[in-house]
Amino acid sequence: MKKVISISLGSSKRDHVVETEILGEKFIIQRLGTDGDMDKAIKLFQDLDGKVDAFGLGGIDLYIYAGDKRYTFRDAKKMIRLIDKTPVVDGSGLKNTLERKVVKYLGNEYDLDLQGKKVLMTCAVDRFGMAEALVEEGCDVTFGDVIFALGLPVPLKSLKGLRRLARVLCPFLTKLPFKMLYPTGHKQNLVKNRFKKFYEEADIIAGDFHYIKKYLPENIQGKVILTNTVTTRDIEMLRERGVWILITTTPDFNGRSFGTNVMEGVLVTLSSKKPSELTSADYEELLEEMVFVPRIEILNSLEKNRH
C-alpha cells in the first residue's frame, strides 16, 4: 500500500483521507492541516519522513513562476529543510502540465467556448501554465495577483506586465512570512466583502480556491469556477451563491478533489523517479495512462440563473 500525505498550513477542518487504486497500485491519500502552525507542520514532516512514499506541501507554495523565472518562498524552504528520505512536492511541477491540459480539454472535449470570455485569474504566478493557456485560448484575462495577494485594487491585463511586475516584486515577496500573502489556518474560513466588481465583470473565475473564496460575493450567478481543490461544504456554498459550472483540475475522490501537491505526490510515487528528474513529458505520459480528466459539475442551470 502506497501512502501520500499532504501536510498543510491550512485549516484542519478540510482534512480528508481516502483509499483508492491508481494504475494498479493501492494508495492511501491523506491531508493533515495544521491551522497555520508552522512548527506543528515541521514536526509532522520530521516524524513521518521515511515512513510514507511522498509528501505534498499544502497551504503554501515552495515555488512560484513568471515565464521561465522561478522564485522560492523562504517559509516553505524552512518547513522542509530537514527532510531527506521522503520526496516533497508542492504541486508546481504538475500544475504547469496538468492545468494547461485542463484548459485545452475544456475547449476541445467539453465544448466550453473560451474565445473572448472574461476571466478573473486570482493569482497567475501561482499557476502560470493555466494563465498562459487561458490567454492562448483567446480569453480576456484580468490577472489579480496584486488584488488577492496584496489587497490592492490593481488589475493586470497582460502576461508581459505580470512578468515585469514579478521580476520586481517576487524576490522581495518570497522572503515575507507567507501568511501575509495567502490565507492560512482559520483565515481560510473567512470571506471578506471586497473587490466585488472584479467578480461581477468576469464570466470565469479561475485560480486557487482560497483566493477565490477570500472575497467571494454573495451572488455570483451564472459564473464558471475553474480551481484546484474543494470540499463538500465549498461546493454547497458555490451552489447557494449561484455558480453555474464548477471545474476542478484534479479528479473527485469520495466527494473531494485534493490539491495538485497531493496529485503530484501520487505521480512521483508511480514514476519511481525523484521529483527533480520528472519532466513535463513524464507527467503528460502518466496523466494519459490514468485517463486523467478534470472534475466538471453543473451546480445550477442557466435558466435558474436568469430568473
Image (tube, grey):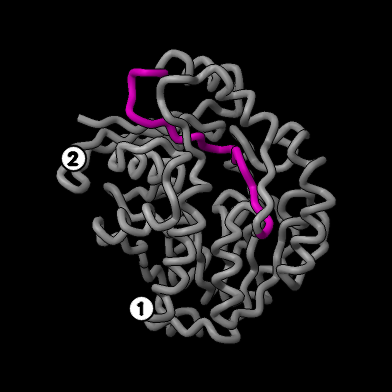
Please give the name of the residue rendered at 47% of the width and 20% of the height, measured from the top-left corner: 84
- Disc 1 marks a residue whose amino acid type is Tyr
Residue 116: x %, y % from top left: 60, 86
Q: Which residue is mark 2?
A: 25
Can the viewer see residue 230? no
* Residue 81 is inside the magenta segment: no
Left or right, 82 with respect to 229, comes to right
* Residue 56 is inside the magenta segment: yes
Residue bounds of the magenta highlight? 49-67
SS of the residue at dot 1?
loop
CA distance separating discs 2 and 1: 29 Å
Residue 17: x %, y % from top left: 31, 35
Location of residue 115 with respect to 228 vertically, above or below = below
Asked if the residues shown at circle 2 and circle 1 are in contact, with their CB atoms under 8 angstroms apart, the answer is: no
* Circle number at residue 196: none
Q: Which residue is mark 1?
A: 110
- Disc 2 marks a residue whose amino acid type is Glu
**Toward the viewer: 45 or 214?**
45
* Nearest-to-viewer mark from 2 and 1: 2
Asked where in the image residue 178 lies, by quadrant, the reply is top right
Left or right, 271 with respect to 138, comes to left
Please give the name of the residue rendered at 68% of the width and 36% of the height, measured from the top-left corner: 73
